[in-house]
Structures are given as C-alpha cells and as structure tokens.
Amino acid sequence: MKLNLNSLRKITLVLALAGLAPMAIAADKYKAPRASDGIRPDLNGIWQALNEANYDIEMHMARPSLALRDGPAGPIPAKETLALGAVGAVPPGMGVVEGGKIPYKPEALATKKENQKNWLDRDPEIKCYLPGVPRATYMPQPFQILQGDNSLLFAYQYAGAVRDIYFEDPGPAPVDSWMGQSVGTWEGDTLVVTVTAQNNKTWFDRSGNHHSDLMTVVERYTPMGPNHLHYEATITDPETFTKPWKISMPLYRRLDNTRLLDFKCVEFVEELMYGKFRKVPLD
C-alpha cells in the first residue's frame, strides 16, 4: 500500500491523539515531589528533548541538508552540504506541530521556503546566536531548571543561554531580545510561562520556520512521572500566522550523572563569519 505525505500526517495525528489519552490519565494520577516550599512541584533537574524537532518541527522524511547558492547556471547545491554526505542529512521525524502544518500566511510561507533553500547562510544556530523560545527547549543539548522558593532559572548548554522566570509581571520589556521576557504562573502542578519581546531573528528549526517580533509563546511544563515532563508551547503571531498553533513533546530527565558543560560556540564561527576579512586567508 502506497501512502503519500498527507496520508502519513493523518495517521500520525490519529496515533498522537490516541496516545494523549493515557498521558492525560497518567498526569492526573501522578503526584510530583514537592519543592522546598512544600507547595509547588519540584522541577529541578537537567532535561532534554529526544526528537528531530531542531531539524524540522513539521513532519518530514529523511532528506539531504541542501543549501542553494547562485552559480553560473542558476541556483546549485552548495558543495559544503554535499561533502558532508550522510552526516549532513536530515533524519526523518514525526513532527511536533499539533495538526501537522504551521498555519503560515502566504507571504510568510514564501519566506520560509527561501530560508530553507538558503539555510546554510541564514540559520541563526550556525552563527551561534541565542536560540530563542521555544527552540532552546528542543535543541540537541540539555538544559537545567533551577528552582528556588521564589525564583526559577532556565540555563541552556547551547551558547550559555539563560532566562529568569518572573513571577511578578514587570510590565512590557524595554527592548526586544534573543530570549525575550518570561513571566510565570502556576496552574496546579503545571508551570505556565508567557514569553514576549523576542526579536524576529530566531528560527524554530533548521528548516527556515520563522516568526516576527510580535510573537507570543505560552509554554506549559507538566510533570508526568519522576523522569519526564510534558511540554507544550502555543505560538501566536498575527503578522506571520493565520491563527495560533501549538507544539508538544516529552522532555526527559538526564539520568547519566550529567551536568551542563561549556558550549560557548562563538569561537567556532568566527572564521565562518569573519574569515573573509583576513588580510592573508587561511589555507
């Protein structure tokens, strides 16, 4: 039986919905350990997503990680991506977008396709820019939640990114930034974080999915068991999308005696970004 991509998306959605019911029941029954205040659930730990969302948050088949550049006969695959072979390929993924597709406006979808073609030159991850929210959550590196009685800090291994979660709304942020401003509340055992004031330079993945500086992200972190959280993020951006949309995934506690290490990637990209200004090029 031959299945096209639309059929696979429908099957995926049915399977995902079927899987949500037992997860919801488990969440209702599970009582997370309490934090030091004895009231809130203890979210302390080092967590990581195990999926292919950083490659492409939508469902996708395996493909070469091609970037196009203009050559004598028009756009051609960049030699850098071809030289990486299987290591540079995109692994297949079921996607984390609920409903399957991001509801782009037509002009924003055209920008996404351009971004994807020129990924090697445009993806902010390649240049070691801070990943923004929600991408920081599902990059292939761990992050740590540090929870105190009246404080909450998220620390990410990638690029040393951090963000404080405010529990008293300080009002509008004075300027937009890479990681935005995060304001948290609790709904039972679920931590709800509203993220605003992100600039428009971050992407959702390596496939060119993008947003404007009007984006608001509402995250939900719910303990589902001793070693995993259910993560949801609802994205609203009237300039880029026709309606709000949601991603969801499990986050797993790292149990391998790990800790966050240094991944200050600026030094890795200096030659890529500024090597052309060398007086004497490197061999």
Image: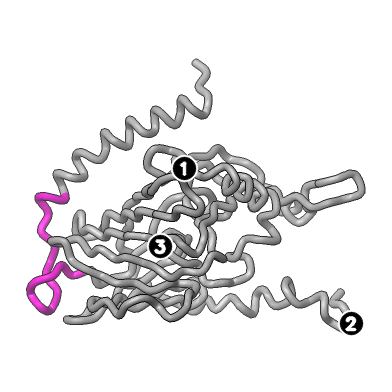
| Residue 28 magenta-highlighted | yes
Separation of disc 1 and disc 3 at Cα? 21 Å
Q: Position of residue 38 (x, y in %)?
A: 7, 74
Give the mark toward the camera: 1 or 3.
Answer: 1
Quarter occupied by the C terminus = bottom right
Do tag 1 and tag 3 residues touch (Cβ < 8 Å)? no
| Residue 205 magenta-highlighted | no
Report the residue that reaches farthest toward the top.
Answer: 1
At label 1, counting other C-alpha atoms closer than 10 Å, the crowd grade (few under 14, some 14-19, many 20 or more) is some
As helix, strand or loop, the secondary structure at mark 3 comes to: helix
Q: Amino acid at mark 3?
A: Thr
Do tag 2 and tag 1 residues touch (Cβ < 8 Å)? no
Q: Quadrant of residue 153?
A: bottom left
Left or right: residue 12 compared with residue 61: left
Q: Amino acid at mark 2?
A: Val
**For mark 1, what is the residue?**
103
Q: Residue at x 36, y 76 (%)?
A: 172
- In the image, is residue 162 above or below residue 62? below
- In the image, is residue 245 above or below residue 191? above
Left or right: residue 223 compared with residue 218: left
- In the image, is residue 99 above or below residue 77? above
Q: Position of residue 180 (x, y in %)?
A: 43, 72
In this orientation, which residue lies closer to the viewer: 105 or 91? 105
What coloring was used for the rendering?
one colour
**For mark 2, what is the residue?**
280
Q: Which residues are magenta?
A: 27-42
- In the image, is residue 57 above or below residue 147? above
Q: Main secondary structure of the magenta part?
A: loop
Would residue 259 be visible to someone looking at this image? no
Would residue 63 be visible to someone looking at this image? yes
Left or right: residue 80 compared with residue 56: right
